[in-house]
Image: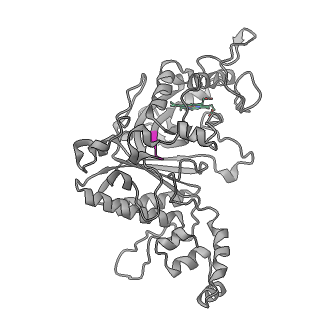
Amino acid sequence: MTRTALEEGVTRRDVLKVAGLTGLGAALYASGIERLLPRALTAQATDQVPFYGTYQAGILTPVQNHIQLVAFDVQTDRRDELIDLLRRWTRACARLAASLSLGESDSQYVPPEDTGEAEGLSASHLTFTFGCGASLFAGDRFGIAHKRPAALRDLPTFDLDQLDDKWSGGDLIVQICADDQQVVFHALRNLTRIGRGIVKIRWTQAGFQRSKAADATGGTPRNLFGFKDGTGNPDLTKDKVRNKHLFYQWQDGSPWLTNGTFLVVRRIQMHLEVWDRTILKEQERTFGRERASGAPLGSTNEFASVTPDQRTLHGETQLPADSHTAVAHGTSKEQLLRRSYSYQAGVNETTGALDAGLLFVSFQRSPDQFITIQKRLAASDRLNEYITHRGSALFACFGGIQKGGYIGDALFA
Ligand code: HEM
């Protein structure tokens, strides 16, 4: 058993369950041969991502197959009630990330503490990433207005935005990711259940990627336009790059946000029918990349650097200046970590077209990184013809949660 689980008050039955020990195994445990457990657990624990750490999980964690974003509005005005909820969520998340049930169901006369649909499922790399929106500070309901980072305010309206309120804003955000959709849903449901009366769901959005198990190439996943998406992310294995582009530093102005980061969510509809009628050459010039290899036009290597390339072939520039890659790249001064997923939400009742697209998720040290890039894209991205931004939200994600602490404790200290 991991120390995390022990410190969270894990029961003996939990241990047996996680270890997958029944029959003889349970008898061995009962007879005191507990030193067998760590090895048994290691096998089961390989798909657990620690909930506690310097940074929150779900940022640097390799992208899982599924995401559920849930934005809550806080209904109470009482600081102690909000803090109590954050403590209860902390306990719940630490248990769920360790693949433990939320509690025993010993009495037949009360509802079970855990809703049960993840019984027997592994953690599937379940992660939780918590943040707060500017509205949490509004009106100083919780005595934290003076702590709002200056950068945490509404994103500007960008040209071509067609935002719908129902996908925007929120006092609190939880990004839940895992490789199993039922594990994700179970987490969403139980956090919501624990929060009942204190918070209410403002919006929730689900996203998917190809499942890693089904991908023989093991390469960069593809978006719904069929292109590899994620190639140009910064190399975050380097401390210097992480500190410069991703994680908030205490000297940025709000020490409670140290090791946190800003999260931007954009719901971007992709007009699949229009795209599907577009010739391959134009598709490739729209992204500035080859569809098959993902290489920037003019190169054969997916990871070749993107240099505004004005060389011409048959009278055309190789990498069009208005291609998504060229415009997003700019001079590469601003960089962000894109951790996006695809979404599909049935049919648009007015047009009869599929409502599908990109649940764009990016993490950055300052929202200005996103704003600068998005201003450029809104002004001249060739991709604009095929997409519409429908939702938008900005959150400040807390630094990592420490054992004994709770989600967002530095903000309320
Ligand atoms: C539906 C909307 C979008 C689609 C389908 C899309 C797709 C892509 C694709 C296929 C690439 C090239 C491969 C890669 O580097 O990942 C790319 C690169 C990139 N995109 Fe997007 N993207 C979308 C929206 C956005 C938005 C809203 C932003 C930020 C404001 C953004 C920022 C970037 C950046 C920074 C790069 C890397 C550029 C470089 O090589 O330096 N994208 N995107």
Above or below for 352 versus 24: above
Most distant residue in the top direction = 315
166 or 130, which lies in front? 130
> If the image is split into quadrants, where does the C terminus sit?
bottom left
Residue 210, position in %: x, y? 63, 47
Query: Which coloring applies here?
Result: one colour
Q: Residue at x 59, y 89 (%)?
A: 30
Q: Is residue 327 left or right of residue 413?
A: right
Q: Quarter for ligand 1?
A: top right
Q: Quadrant of the N terminus?
A: bottom right
Q: Quadrant of residue 154?
A: top left
Of 249 and 367, which appears nearest the observer? 249
Left or right relative to 293: residue 200: left
The magenta region covers 259-264
User: Was residue 260 drawn as part of the magenta stretch in this picture?
Assistant: yes
Can residue 275 be found in the magenta stretch? Answer: no
Q: Is residue 85 above or below residue 349?
A: below
Determine the main secondary structure of the stretch shown in magenta.
strand
**In the rendering, at what x and y percent does residue 67 appear?**
52, 50
Q: Is residue 312 visible?
A: yes
The quadrant holding residue 327 is: top right
> Residue shown at 40%/74% (left/top)?
112
